[in-house]
């Protein structure tokens, strides 16, 4: 055959590869856009405003403003208990990269401070999906070579991208738009980008790919050190293997061959570039950490404001020798992370929720054990694919280039598990390892399905993975939705809406009512997860997460009053506006009049550490004003609103009892203005009471 005759075959092969990649990208793009819509809806809690603010969502904005002034310290009052007080200055421990990304915005305006977190998280999510797609194409080539892309593979790739995006811990990160989840999301996204570049180093050795690996690795390491350490470990393994082969004259070249490190990495110039890609992120991290805390790598948790007043933190520090990091925490974390039963089934929508607190192994003291599931329980499809991928990596040389990145990704993820905190979000530190292993498994399964003549076993595995993928989607939605709307809502209305929707769904399903509802005058000390408690004849409705009670709706029986008042024309003196309870145990809301038509609202309680006083408020004597008051002795909440403006919002110790005396209180001068009590509606409580049918006494 002549060279001219062979040329069309080469062209056709190249064109087939281009077409395959185009179809591959198209499938991933469609799936990614659908996933982005789901993530957008979740991260904004169903709202249309991508710039709404949430508590603890402004830390990176604060850090960015400080960086514009060429300093690391931040205003203490802006960061509350998360600040570290070092030599009279306050610092944050979060990596600076998300703050650096905000610099172009905060340099122009501060009007978006506290409202950039959602946009930042959407950007991080997009970056993660882009590099999941790139990694999938790279790993496909390693596992399957230049095999043509079938329609089945297009569906499989699109489904995989959607599964990673909405059927993994990535979706859970959308449950809260605050600094902790934003950090996790950017850390995982940068790490995925770094592993893509590391595969580029191994497959197409050049300074370009080494520089990209170093840049992405630096971004990950300076965002979240644990997950960011993974790419540096992977590069270090490759460099060590290359140097070993070079120094031993190929006698000890087995590690390099096992890692698929090409000969082109042997020249000293590329080896030096590899060393720089590892060293520069470490040097930058040391510089940042030393500038803040005066140490190369440590974080002085004892100097954190939270450690000064929180009893649980102080106990954990005392029991662990002042340090909350160590291998002794690893057994507990690994057990929680790997247990397949880390879910709890519920009779109400969404029917799946978190299990109880993690089981502590070894008697160590943990600072926090948050609501947490596990990898096999929440990501069963990815667990099966990842297990298959590990087997393929151990047995086949074709995908050997993935070995070093996977070892690094596992190392970085496991580093997170040496801390005295158990949290569901920490699974995102292992997401890069899950992606790398499961992609190998996915493409090995697709390759087997195409090769095998008798494909019974591949069909069985494919069906199992498909079923588990659907289950994964629902589990992650259920956990994310319930975490966002009931366990940690942005406001009480979200929890009320969530419980109301549960009742809607339960009414739709025959055989109800389901759920656990109790009635009485006093809350039990502790309720079961999801339990509702109706006080009296809907004087209040409370919900339990099994750890504490939360008010869902309040009326008079739970200390909620709406008042229409006309203030007297006084410039001094004290009057009682409201009393809750009986005798000397009354909780009293008092008005203290000041000159210039001003007054303070003051809450007095015999069991409180001291009075709660509002700032001076402007009042207009004789003009009708609206006052909304909550004095809830069951939860300790004191909240006062004057004409829609909050004047008191505190948690304190309150005396027991819910008997109200409006306009007067024991031992106090009565209110000398005019006052009219308005009704407080409790529609959800009324509905629950009617559905579950208790015969109650009146306390509303």
Image (cartoon, helix red, strand yellow):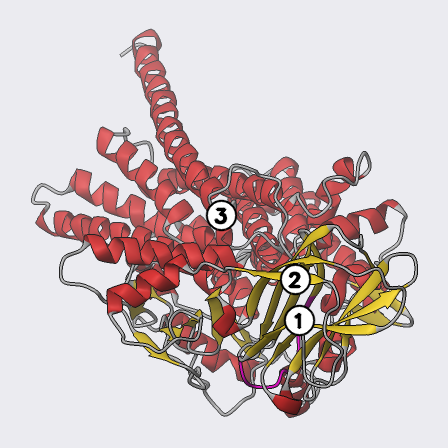
Residue 608 place in picture, x, y as percent = 70, 84
Query: Crowding at label 1, few (<14), some or many (≥20) Cα neighbours within 10 Å?
Result: many
Which residue position is annotated with label 3?
45
Residue 84 place in picture, x, y as percent = 79, 70
Which residue position is annotated with label 1?
663
Residue 402 visible? The answer is yes
Query: Which residue, as the protein is rendered here, is positioned at the far top?
Result: 4
On screen, 480 above or below 43? below
Closer to the camera: disc 2 or disc 3?
2
- Mark seen at residue 675: 2
* Left or right placement of residue 39 versus residue 614 in this view: left
- Mark seen at residue 449: none
Query: Crowding at label 2, few (<14), some or many (≥20) Cα neighbours within 10 Å?
Result: some
Of the two numbered discs 1 and 2 on the same chain, state the one appearing first in sequence. Answer: 1
Residue at image position (46%, 85%) is 360
Q: Quadrant of the N terminus?
A: top left
Identify which residue, 483 or 28, lies in the foreground. 483
Q: Are marks 1 and 2 in contact (CB under 8 Å)?
A: yes
The segment highlighted magenta reads 649-658
């Amino acid at each position: 055959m002549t060279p001219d005759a062979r040329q069309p075959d080469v062209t056709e092969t190249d064109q087939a590869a281009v077409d395959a990649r185009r179809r591959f990208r198209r499938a991933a793009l469609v799936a990614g856009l659908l996933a982005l819509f789901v993530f957008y809806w979740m991260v904004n809690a169903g709202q249309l405003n991508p710039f709404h603010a949430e508590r603890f969502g402004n830390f990176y904005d604060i850090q960015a403003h400080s960086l514009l002034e060429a300093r690391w310290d931040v205003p203490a009052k802006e960061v509350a208990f998360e600040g570290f007080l070092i030599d009279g200055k306050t610092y944050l421990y979060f990596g600076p990269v998300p703050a650096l990304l905000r610099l172009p915005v905060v340099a122009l305006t501060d009007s978006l401070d506290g409202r950039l977190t959602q946009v930042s998280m959407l950007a991080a999510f997009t970056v993660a999906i882009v590099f999941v797609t790139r990694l999938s194409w790279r790993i496909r080539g390693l596992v399957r070579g230049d095999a043509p892309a079938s329609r089945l593979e297009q569906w499989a790739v699109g489904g995989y991208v959607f599964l990673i995006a909405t059927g993994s811990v990535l979706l859970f990160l959308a449950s809260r738009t605050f600094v902790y989840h934003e950090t996790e999301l950017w850390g995982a996204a940068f790490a995925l980008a770094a592993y893509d570049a590391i595969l580029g180093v191994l497959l197409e050795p050049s300074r370009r790919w080494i520089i990209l690996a170093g840049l992405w690795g630096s971004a990950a390491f300076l965002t979240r050190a644990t997950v960011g350490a993974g790419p540096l470990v992977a590069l270090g393994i490759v460099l060590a293997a290359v140097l070993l082969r070079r120094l031993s004259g190929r006698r000890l070249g087995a590690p390099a061959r096992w890692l698929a490190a090409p000969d082109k990495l042997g020249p000293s110039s590329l080896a030096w570039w590899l060393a720089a890609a590892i060293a520069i992120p470490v040097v930058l991290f040391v510089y940042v950490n030393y500038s803040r805390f005066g140490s190369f790598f440590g974080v002085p948790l004892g100097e954190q404001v939270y450690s000064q007043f929180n009893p649980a933190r102080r106990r954990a520090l005392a029991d662990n020798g002042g340090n909350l990091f160590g291998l002794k925490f690893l057994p507990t974390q690994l057990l929680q992370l790997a247990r397949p039963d880390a879910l709890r089934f519920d009779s109400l929508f969404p029917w799946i929720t978190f299990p109880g607190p993690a089981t502590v192994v070894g008697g160590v003291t943990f600072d926090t054990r948050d609501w947490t599931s596990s990898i096999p329980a929440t990501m069963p499809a990815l667990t099966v694919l990842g297990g298959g991928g590990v087997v393929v990596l151990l047995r086949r040389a074709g995908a050997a280039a993935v070995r070093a990145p996977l070892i690094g990704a596992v190392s970085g993820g496991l580093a997170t598990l040496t801390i005295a905190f158990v949290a569901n979000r920490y699974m995102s530190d292992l997401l890069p390892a899950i992606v790398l292993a499961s992609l190998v498994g996915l493409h090995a399964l697709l390759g087997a399905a195409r090769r095998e003549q008798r494909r019974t076993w591949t069909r069985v595995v494919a069906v199992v993975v498909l079923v588990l993928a659907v289950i994964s989607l629902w589990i992650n939605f259920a956990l994310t939705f319930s975490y966002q709307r009931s366990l940690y809502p942005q406001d009480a209305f979200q929890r009320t809406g969530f419980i109301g929707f549960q009742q809607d769904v339960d009414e739709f399903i025959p055989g109800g009512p389901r759920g656990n509802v109790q009635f009485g005058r006093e809350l039990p000390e502790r309720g079961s997860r999801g339990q509702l408690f109706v006080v009296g004849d809907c004087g209040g409705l409370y919900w339990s997460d099994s750890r504490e009670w939360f008010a869902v709706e309040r009326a008079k029986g739970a200390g909620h009053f709406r008042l229409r008042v006309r203030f007297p024309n006084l410039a001094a003196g004290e009057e009682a506006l409201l009393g809750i309870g009986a005798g000397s145990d009354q909780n009293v809301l008092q008005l203290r009049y000041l000159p210039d038509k001003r007054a303070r609202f003051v809450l007095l309680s015999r069991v409180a550490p001291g009075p709660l006083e509002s700032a001076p408020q402007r009042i207009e004597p004789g003009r009708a004003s609206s006052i909304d008051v909550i004095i809830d002795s069951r939860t300790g909440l004191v909240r006062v609103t004057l004409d829609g403006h909050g004047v008191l919002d505190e948690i304190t110790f309150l005396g027991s009892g819910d008997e109200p005396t409006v306009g007067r209180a024991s031992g106090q001068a009565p209110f000398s203005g005019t006052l009219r009590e308005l009704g407080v509606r409790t529609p959800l409580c009324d509905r629950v009471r009617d559905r579950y049918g208790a015969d109650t006494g009146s306390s509303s």
